[in-house]
Amino acid sequence: MSDPALERIERALAEAGADQQPPPGWEARVLAAIDAKPARRAPWWLLVPALAAAAAIVFLVWPRAATPPQQLAVAITIDRGGPLVRGTSAHVGDTLHATATGGDGHRAVWIYRDDRELLATCAGDDACTFTIPSRGDYAIVALAAAAPLPAPRGVLDDDVAAAAKAGAQFTIEAVAVR
Amino acid sequence: MDAQINTASVADDPSLVVPYPKPVDDPDREVRARIDAGDASGALRLLMQRHGAAIYRFCREALRDDALAADVQQQVFVEAYRDLARFRGQSSVRTWLFGIARHRCLDAAKGRRRWTQRFKNDAGDEPVDPRPTAGDRIDDVRLRTALNECLDEIGEHIRTAVLLRYQQGFSYEDMASVCREKANTLQARVLRALPILRRCIETRTGGAV
């Protein structure tokens, strides 16, 4: 290859997506997907009486005022000394407020820097307030579980995988601090 | 350095005969050792640590979609974990993994195409970049921007081949294992794509590469 134009394109291709990183917690999602073993499929003919029984039960005991469980979510606001803003980027010294909503039972928020440093843990429904100490890629993990959550050890992927194994729902948001 | 084979000495000494299939000297030996030891979970963690970012980057550029690339990346490692015990070492672990990734990316692209054809919105097409600087050599930033757009315009099979070659640095022989196609076919596909990309970039920018 001696055409400088094509060589230039080759170099640009080599750098294509160089700034792209997988989303935080992706390893935990893989481990959680592997741990969630598929249920064995029942013979089809068993489904007929099962569906009929289920329909009868739903008809008889449907709670009139039932509301579906809300999806677990985490709301993040950044306090820069002025009005609060929603966002996924912040600066050193900003105060971050993270609130987990939805999901069932015990809720918690865990905050990590660069996936390997656990900087804050909060339990309950109140906003988790945290002053950002340094630059990095922060991951804000909201969790909810019927049983108490296992204590995080400090590595995002391992902690979230352990929580998922214990039956917790989780969601992860990223905040870049530059 | 290419291996030198002395046929006379091979005939004289049966121990010099290379068994078939030839085991690949794999930088991921540690991964293979864990597979052999039955430690699938440890092997998977190593695989994710070593190749997770590269697989995501490949899928992101092949699919041009962050969320879809993240889903496919997850599928790739779940599938790799499922198939670890069947991995025979006839290619490197990286080649094997990228074979799964390419396959899943093409499946995802096909699924998306089916969906977008059903709900096609013509208003979503990007207009041609109207910044003409006729004859000028375009700068790196404009080159990258235009290249990014032009990669959208070539078919997925060509795009994945170009990315395997230049973004991931695979040889055509390794690409043949990844794509299950002949090395010459892939080389021709990649070399044909470069002038197409060049024309597209120059049309979009109005400058020379």
Image (cartoon, helix red, strand yellow):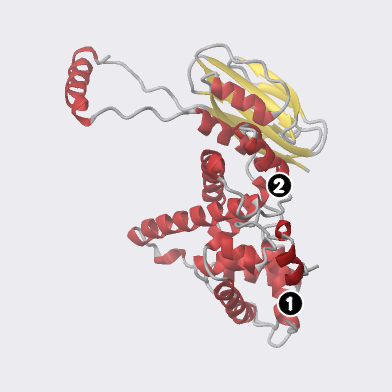
Same chain under badges 1 and 2? The reply is: no
Residue with the mark numbered 2: B28
Q: Is residue B130 visible?
A: no
Q: Is residue B28 above or below residue B184?
A: above
Name the chain letter of the residue that bears numbered label 1. A
Name the chain letter of the residue that bears numbered label 2. B
Q: Name the secondary structure under disc 1.
A: helix
Q: Position of residue A143 (x, y in %)?
A: 57, 23
Q: Position of residue A126 (x, y in %)?
A: 61, 17
Single out the mark in the foreground, 1 or 2.
2
Q: CA distance from mark 1 to mark 2?
A: 30 Å
Label for residue A7? 1
Q: Name the secondary structure under disc 2.
A: loop
Residue at (32%, 17%) from the top-left corner? A66
Q: Is residue B150 above or below residue B98?
A: below
| Mark 2 neighbour class, 10 Å CA radius: few under 14, some 14 to 19, many 20 or more | some
Where, by quadrant of the figure, is residue B120 drawn?
bottom left
Residue at (75%, 31%) from the top-left corner? A116
